[in-house]
Amino acid sequence: MKRTLSLAIFSLLIAAGLAPSRVNAEKPNFVVIFCDDLGYGDLGCFGHPSIRTPHLDRMAVEGQRWTNFYVGASVCTPSRAALLTGRLPVRNGMMSARRRVLFPDSKGGLQKSEVTIAECLKAVGYATAAVGKWHLGHLPPCLPTYQGFEYYYGVPYSNDMWIDPANKLADDIVIRSGLTRADLEKGHKKRNWVPLFRGEEVIEYPADQNTLTKRYTEEAIRFINADKDKPFFLYLPHTMVHLPLAVSKAFAGRTGRLIWDAIEEVDWSVGEILGAVRKAGIADETLVIFTSDNGAAVGSSLPLRAKKGSVYDGGIREPTVMWWPGQIPAGKTCREVAATIDLLPTLAGLCGGKLPERKIDGLDIWPLMSGRAGAKSPHEFYVLMHGPGTVRSGKWKFYPWKEGRSGRRREKQPANPSPEPVQLYDTVADIGEKNNLAGANADLTRRLQAAYTAHVEEIKKNRRPTAAMPRKKNASSAQRPSQGKKKPNPKKNPKKKNAAAN
Ligand code: MG
């Protein structure tokens, strides 16, 4: 057996109020399961009354729920960049002013010189794999295999996008729907038809989305079993529950709502992963973290305000569960503020990994994870520049803009917005962020405004561009399929509700 204190010693330490400070000289396995567009209120263990998530509920009973856990942005690409690099998306170049996420015709991606969790861990002997949605660049040099992942299997961006004809097709590619290899090489494209990759090649087109959750799970378990005798890092960013929703036969029609079916299948997947870890006999040396990239698109972010795309809590505060028998105290809830940017320094700290030399924004949250008495959030101010911006500090959430002016068209605005020029909410007394207390807390508001301004000035000085993704000469255009075509008459063809493209 690799590493770690025994459960008995751990229990004694906890009883004595002494959580382990560090698992020195050990190399635990790390599994990060990153759901897509799952809302704060979408799990049984976070209060959903109907969706059945028994595996995540059990994970929470055996592990730790985090109720103030944030992501780095309220949409896919910058949120993923933040998790993997420990750096806020403006700093790491993955927050574009023009487009909020990458598309198949984007010309850039994550800089190769950014240091990801995978690179950090690989350098100290870890086997690394990414299984699922990448969305940080779909051509070399931006693919997972250039960012520390030895193995990649998945869809390179959101499942409502299309194929880029510049992608390399595998010799044994499976092509569905009556298409031929020549069709793809000539530049065929269609919305919601996405490629499935293994390594750097397309192995299936269009990807059968109904079986993606199931196949990601099988790939992940294969990796766990193959690498259980050495330390491993598995990054499992699910394609679900991003639109268009799809489920395998076993989950279709279970609840009467496709979004609920899809969440239940993700929960099944978590159960399979934890089951594989237990079966391999490595539960006491494996840390598993479950969270999501941004708030609900279709599901529920309740009781939080707003959903995906917003910097109100419903867009960026995620249902998070951490599990590590014998190291993370069971059945506890951590209410301190932490974020996905903290994973890189925390995981690196747990295995003796070297932190990147460039500045990172994340901080070590092991004292909170291990339940150390009196441990507090390391973030005095958690600041996001995404959209119109926000600051979380202790229980306070500050917005340097007037209510009703978020600039987000889809966001439901209150009937009577506060007249204050900025917003301040007490997230403990008012979790739904309804009562603007800015007027009654002038000093605090000034301090939070100053923190926001200082952050923006610093990060703007240190921001970097996205990496260029050179395309092959003469490659067909990757522009979105609808471009350049005659617009249909909306009266003759009532437009279907469009899938969210981020
Ligand atoms: Mg997302």
Image (spheres, rainbow, N blue to C red):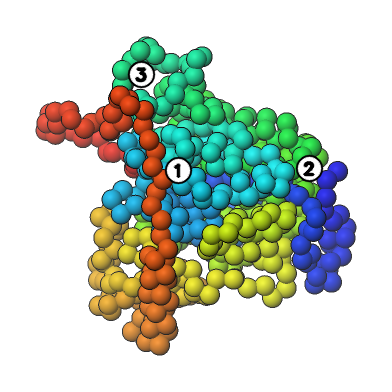
Residue 60 shows in the view: no
C-alpha span from label 3 to label 2: 43 Å
Residue 234: in sight, yes or no?
yes
Identify the image quadrant of the N terminus: top right
Mark 1 element type: loop
Residue ID for mark 2: 282
Amino acid marked by disc 1: Leu
Is 14 left, or right, of 70 in this rendering? right
Pick whichever, 464 or 248, lies toward us. Answer: 464
Give the residue drawn at x 34%, y 52%: 96
Q: Which mark is residue 184?
A: 3
Mark 1 vs 2, N-terminal side:
1
User: In the rendered image, which quarter contains the C terminus?
Assistant: top left
Residue tagged 1: 136
Q: Are marks 3 and 2 in contact (CB under 8 Å)?
A: no
Q: Nearer the viewer, mark 3 or mark 2?
A: 3
Camera-nearest residue between 21 and 207: 21
Say whether mark 2 is within 8 Å of ligand 1.
Answer: no
Task: Tell me if mark 2 has few (under 14), some (14-19) or many (20+) residues whose alpha carbon lies within 10 angstroms of its own.
Answer: many
Q: Quadrant of residue 194?
A: top left
The residue sitting at 87% across, 65% down in the picture is: 12
